[in-house]
Amino acid sequence: MSERPQQRQDPVDAIIQQWATVRPDLDTAAMEVFGRINRLSHAMADRVARAYAPYGISRGEFDVLATLRRSGEPYTLSPRQLSATLMLTTGGMTGRLDKLERAGLLRRSPDPHDRRGLHVTLTDKGLGLVDEAVGAGLAVQTEALSALDADRAGLLAGLLRELLAGTDRP
């Protein structure tokens, strides 16, 4: 069995050490995990946002385009379906849709089956842009994940899946 090299200290270790000094009675194991998840999430969100910037879109706007793209042809969903998928209010969704429509990346049209409804459809320009942007975002994520070998990355994905599933319990 090979020994893993000593892991270097990170800012979370310093926080844990401070708590151990002032409150040695606390079990900070959860803080070690979630503190790192939180810091990693923020760091990756910033990196991914920089990857999308050359395409003129924010991460939130990418999420709208990507949701339409993942829906498959004809790349059309209702604003309500988009809001539910992205966990956004309809007001928050409207702002994103307005900007993306002005940029020619999607179009809104009346729902032929519901006079009050709308369809949001990815344009050809939007399709091309999201296909390029998803590659740029994945490249950033893949580069960050390269700190782990494939087995450890798979193990981490599985552990995070279990942890996430555990948060869905009441």
Image: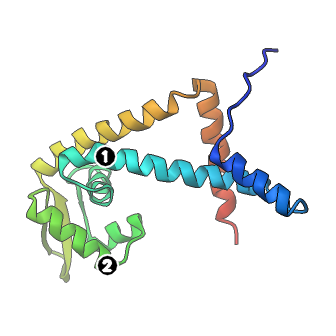
Position of residue 141 measured from the top left corner of the image (x, y, whole percent): 43, 38
Dot 1 lies on which element? helix
Position of residue 104 measured from the top left corner of the image (x, y, whole percent): 8, 58
Q: Residue at x 40, y 70 (%)?
A: 84
Q: Residue at x 68, y 38 (%)?
A: 9
Position of residue 113 measured from the top left corner of the image (x, y, whole percent): 19, 76
Tell which of 130 and 52 is nearer to you.
Answer: 52
Q: Check disc 2 and report the residue beneath it.
A: 90
Three-letter amino acid code at the position of disc 1? Arg
Say which of marks 2 and 1 sits in front. Answer: 1
Q: Residue at x 75, y 53 (%)?
A: 16
94 displayed left or right of 159:
left
Residue farthest toward the bottom in the current orientation of the protein:
116
Three-letter amino acid code at the position of disc 2? Thr
Q: Check disc 1 and report the residue beneath it.
A: 50
Disc 2 from disc 1: Cα separation: 26 Å
